[in-house]
Amino acid sequence: MWLWGTAHAVDDMYQGLVPACVPYFVLDRGYGYVAATGLTLAAAIGSSIPQPFVGMAVDRRRLDWLAPAGVALAGIGLGLAGIAGPYPLVVALVFLSGLGVAMFHPAAGKGAREAAGDSAAAMSVFAAGGSVGFFLAPVLAIPALMAMGVGATALFIPPAVLIAFVMLRKHTRTAAAPPQPRDGPDRWGPFAVLTGIEVVRSLLWVGIITFIELYWIRHLGSGHAVAGIALAGFMLGSVIGTLMGGRLADRFGAVRTTRIGGVLIIPLLVLLRFVPDQYAALVVALAVGIAINIPFAVLVKLAQDYLPTRPGTAAGVTLGLAMSVGGLFAPAYGLIAEWHGPEGVFTVLCVVPVAAVVLGVFLKRP
């Protein structure tokens, strides 16, 4: 589980680097909001659309090389994007990085479930790895970006190459227990409801991580350092929420835990939008991160319970397609920010989680 969790952390660090770099593309390269969110869109297309197909391939064959190859591509693509010149080349490299993420998640999600068995807490170790990666991205990148500009992304190529090498040496399968036979019918109806909830979470996630720094800088009037702390605090809360959600699910059930997370996020987002002080709002950003990620590991495990014969497909949809599809709406957030500023984006985000609460009513126990 720790191998899968560490690899997940490294892989998702590159997803987290995209929104961490967006403000610096705006400030250093002079990109407009729409152009900057085009980078988020490129990463989302690369990482979301291919994942169900990769998941189906993983369910048919044991493709041990796919996860290490994916994390290597994710790191190399994103690392080169910051030093590329023309905007189309930057977009292409960010897209390739997203494609690497699409290669990683289904194979890793299947292997992690084999290691975790039926424990949501164990599965949360793997899921929390992704949250750790998103957390580390701004913590490690922002000081480098402030000192060197967007070209500092090249410093983040080596971790991807290193973890890919370790995974290949371990052949990945040595970290997992022998696959447990799973039977029972695939329940596509509840799985569709769950996917809808994950899409709502993705819309929230993308909006927050793309604009939280700009919200602090241009609405709350903070400096870059405090804005970076806000993003890091949100990511730290995500790690805490992921681990907390796994333990809550083992105690109270996956469906109830998912509903709890959906309800908690609404008042916290409203509070974040209207707290006027940049320092007090940091605490709220941490709490928002916790609430939004309480259902994260739970939804991955629950999806695989709904599709017991297709764990790779379930992981590909929940970790990939549904989680990344919010990036497809990044240009819409960019247009809102152009017209109403980053605060307009956060006003819209206050309404989005209502859909998750409604969908949560229709979730079924596996």
Image (tube, rainbow, N blue to C red):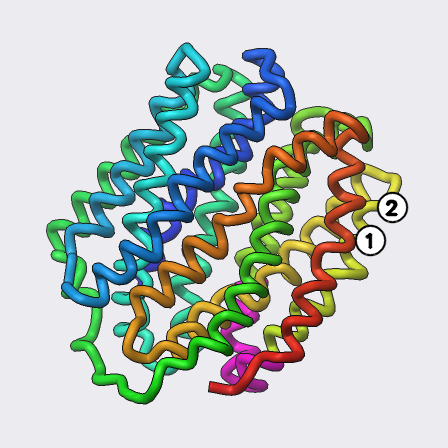
Which residue is at a point 26% across and 84% down the rendered structure image?
182
Q: Is residue 30 visible?
A: yes
Which residue is at a point 61% across and 55% down the rendered structure image?
237
Q: Is residue 144 left or right of residue 89?
A: right
Of 104 and 56, the residue lying toward us: 56
Residue 45 coordinates in the image, percent (x, y): 43, 40
Rounded to the nearest angstrom, the CA distance separating label 1 from label 2 is: 6 Å
Q: Is residue 6 visible?
A: no
Label 1: few (<14), some (14–19) or many (≥20) C-alpha neighbours in 10 Å: some
Q: Is residue 153 left or right of residue 224?
A: left
Mark 1 vs 2: CB contact within 8 A: yes
Which residue is at a point 55% across and 84% down the rendered structure image?
364
Please tell me the numbered disc located at residue 274. 2
Q: Splitting the image into 4 quarters, where does residue 263 fall?
A: bottom right
Residue position marked by numbered label 1 in the rendering: 270
Q: Splitting the image into 4 quarters, where does residue 289 fall?
A: bottom right
Q: Is residue 283 left or right of residue 129?
A: right
Magenta region, residue range: 241-256
- What amino acid does circle 2 point to? Phe
Please tell me the numbered disc located at residue 342. none
SS at mark 1 in the image: helix
As drawn, 202 above or below 148: below
Of 198 and 153, the residue lying toward us: 198
Residue 338 coordinates in the image, percent (x, y): 73, 25
Label 2: few (<14), some (14–19) or many (≥20) C-alpha neighbours in 10 Å: few
Residue 158 coordinates in the image, percent (x, y): 28, 32
